[in-house]
Image (cartoon, rainbow, N blue to C red):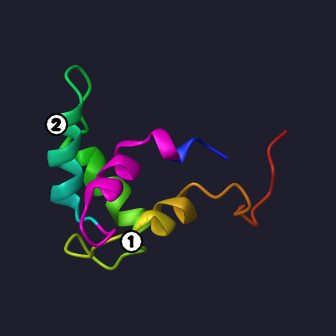
Amino acid sequence: MLALSASPAASAVAHSKDGKIDVHDLLNHSAAESRYTNISPLEANLVWHFASRGRGPQTRLDLDDFRALLDEQVSSSGPRIP
């Protein structure tokens, strides 16, 4: 599994009061914590769309929502290309 503990989302969740963040919290925390690499609004919205499973950008997500996004156990049922 990918290292979620080192991600901007995990860091933002760790600094939130209720253990949940919205897309603006992610962008603000990323900008404050990183000098050279920021998450663009487009990247944040794409991650949010998939992690929230279509519930919308106002949805507050916790770390389990991001873990489900990166879960290696989920696979497509389509044909595999060798």
Q: Which residues are magenta?
A: 5-20
List x then y, in percent, for residue 32: 15, 36
List x then y, in percent, for residue 36: 23, 19
Query: In the image, 33: left or right of 55?
Result: left
Few, some or many C-alpha atoms within 10 Å of disc 1 (few <14, some 14-19, many ≥20)?
A: many
In this view, which residue lies farthest toward the right? 82
Which is more toward the observer, 8 or 43?
Answer: 8
Q: In the displayed structure, would residue 38 be above or below residue 60?
A: above
Residue, disc 2: 31
Name the residue: 50% across, 45% down.
5
Q: In the displayed structure, would residue 18 be above or below residue 5?
A: below
Q: Is residue 7 magenta?
A: yes
Q: In the displayed structure, would residue 13 be above or below residue 38?
A: below
List x then y, in percent, for residue 42: 23, 47
In this view, which residue lies farthest toward the bottom? 55
Name the residue: 15% across, 57% down.
24
Residue, disc 1: 52
The quarter of the displayed image where residue 40 is located = top left
Q: Which mark is residue 2?
A: none
Nearest to N terminus: mark 1 or mark 2: 2
Query: In the image, 53: left or right of 60?
Result: right
Query: In the image, 29: left or right of 76?
Result: left
